[in-house]
Amino acid sequence: TSTRIGVAGLAVMGKNMALNIAEKGFPVSVYNRTASKVDDTVQRAKAEGNLPVYGFHDPKSFINSIQKPRVVLILVKAGAPVDDTINTLLPFMETGDCIIDGGNEWYETTERRQKAMAELGLLYLGMGVSGGEEGARNGPSLMPGGSIDAYKNIEDILLKVAAQVSDSGPCVTYVGEGGSGHFVKMVHNAVEYGDMQLITEASDVLKSAGKLSNQEIHEVFSEWNRGELRSYLIEITAHIFGVKDDKGKGYLVDKVLDKTSLKDNGRWFVQQAAELSVSAPTIAASLDARYLCGLKGERVEAAKVYQSAEFGEEVNKEKLINDVKQALYASKICNYAQGMNLIPAKSVEKGWSLKPREIARIWKAGCVVQGVFLERVRKAYDTNPDLVNLLVDPEFAKEMMQRQSALRRVVCVAINCGVSTPGMSASLAYFDSYRRERVATSLVQAQLDYFGAHTYERIDTEGSFHTDWIKIVKRMNE
Ligand code: 2AM
């Protein structure tokens, strides 16, 4: 018997994807460099009701077990492990076969492999997979990009394996050509950075300025998860604040070291935003927050230096909770506005014809940023596919208008209480810069013209002007 697809790399994601695919009725071949993971996956498949998962310990019989044209989904760490895995499988693959890299690869690396594989007659897809273990097993969000023929070969599988949303369909779409699938996954992860940072700031303001207990924060987030903020990240945050420490007194969240691991995606996003001149301060601030939190030792010393600093403000708990809720939502709009804006910018540069509406649709479920908010984003792009910024979508604009004063109040409280809210502050600054017809940076241009004769344009006359500022100032002082 031959199988429909092979999965190579059976760590958490690969194993669960294989089980998911098999459960949807597609026989799967599985392979892993270390054989024990193959046996473990086959055993799990048996235990879960004899799912059609077939294990192989050598690459040749693995490849030969798959029906032609063969499709192999690789789920190993990005970088060299992907090249190693491809090189292991390649000798047994034939013209027309497909390789799918389901990892978090840098899109240019994906394009390099795409080219190399095309020269050998193989089709290649770079596919973003989001949703962690739970998503992989029960329905992730899938972002495949690259060979459209490769996509067509497995579209039936992907449509069934992806998270299902009743009103908008499976969370998968053909994203576009080249490395666009991995690029869009990078954007997803950057927006995820922003969401996580904003939620963390919201909880910090509640705890440090509002003096809420963990139990109260748990209840607040549980309540928020029933409304417009309803999302996976709000849900797990509510859960986290309710978990007691099993190794001592108090709550576990207070025992977790305040040092965050860094993944490549946030940095890649900010680098791309800079290269394409896309403003993304909320995401940049979220990345930056991880650099500072990594300096645990330095912060311990700095805290001693500034021990006697005084700050604080009387706050009304109930009012603060409501304000923080509004501030979080308003900041979230700014976060998504920035994340989504990188998509058309890159699409134009690469000629990818990416569709923001479709991308918002496939993020509605399965992935880490899933939530009711994505339906709002999808609607905004539905109304206007060429929307330049979520902030000027009529619906989001209305919501910003209702919430902007709460965002100001929360940032003020945070500042007065010495609580850092880089994500919310950056979101507010983004909003305040974007919504103003005339910003103060005309001064920057005047300075440039003063010392470097860079010239400037005028608001009232066309053309390019230079003023001899020095001469005028000299004359004025005579
Ligand atoms: P392993 O079980 O043999 O270590 C997550 O690390 C997954 O990537 C695992 O399935 C792991 O295989 C695989 N992996 C990591 N480095 C690899 C490499 N250089 N070649 C093949 N697989 C690799």
Image (cartoon, rainbow, N blue to C red):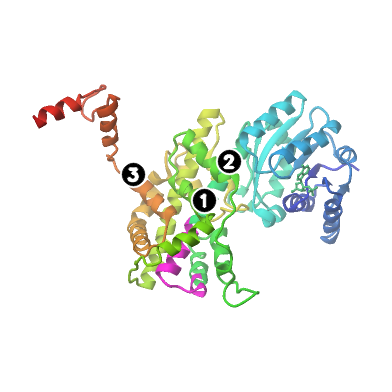
CB-based contact (under 8 Å), mark 3 and mark 2: no
- Split into 4 quadrants, where in the image is the C terminus? top left
Task: Please tell me whether mark 1 sits on a helix, a strand or a loop.
Answer: helix
Q: Residue furthest left?
A: 478
Q: In this view, does 386 lie above or below 375?
A: above
Front one among 392 and 217: 217
User: Which image quarter: residue 445?
Assistant: top left
Residue 201 among those drawn in magenta: yes
**Residue denoted by label 1:** 291
Q: Nearer the viewer, mark 1 or mark 3?
A: 1
Is residue 453 in the magenta section?
no
Task: Give the amino acid at mark 3.
Answer: Ser
Q: Where is residue 329 in the image (x, y as percent from the top left)?
A: 44, 57
The dot on residue 184 is 2
The local crowd at label 2, few if under 14, some if 14 to 19, many if 20 or more residues have their Cα within 10 Å, is many
Residue 57 appears anywhere in the view: yes
Q: Where is residue 26 in the image (x, y as percent from the top left)?
A: 80, 47
Q: What element carries label 2?
A: helix
Relative horizontal placement of residue 232, taking residue 16 as reference (left or right): left
Answer yes or no: disc 3 within 8 Å of ligand 1.
no
Label 3 element class: helix
Q: If you read the primary sequence from the N terminus, does the residue marked by circle 3 or circle 2 appear first?
A: 2
* Circle 1 Cα neighbour tier, 10 Å, few/some/many (<14 / 14–19 / ≥20): some
Q: Residue at x 65, y 33 (%)?
A: 109
Residue 433: mark in rendering: 3
Magenta residues span 198-217
Identify the residue at image location x=34%, y=71%: 315
Q: Which of marks 3 and 2 is in front?
A: 3
Q: Please, what is the three-letter code of the amino acid marked with disc 1?
A: Tyr
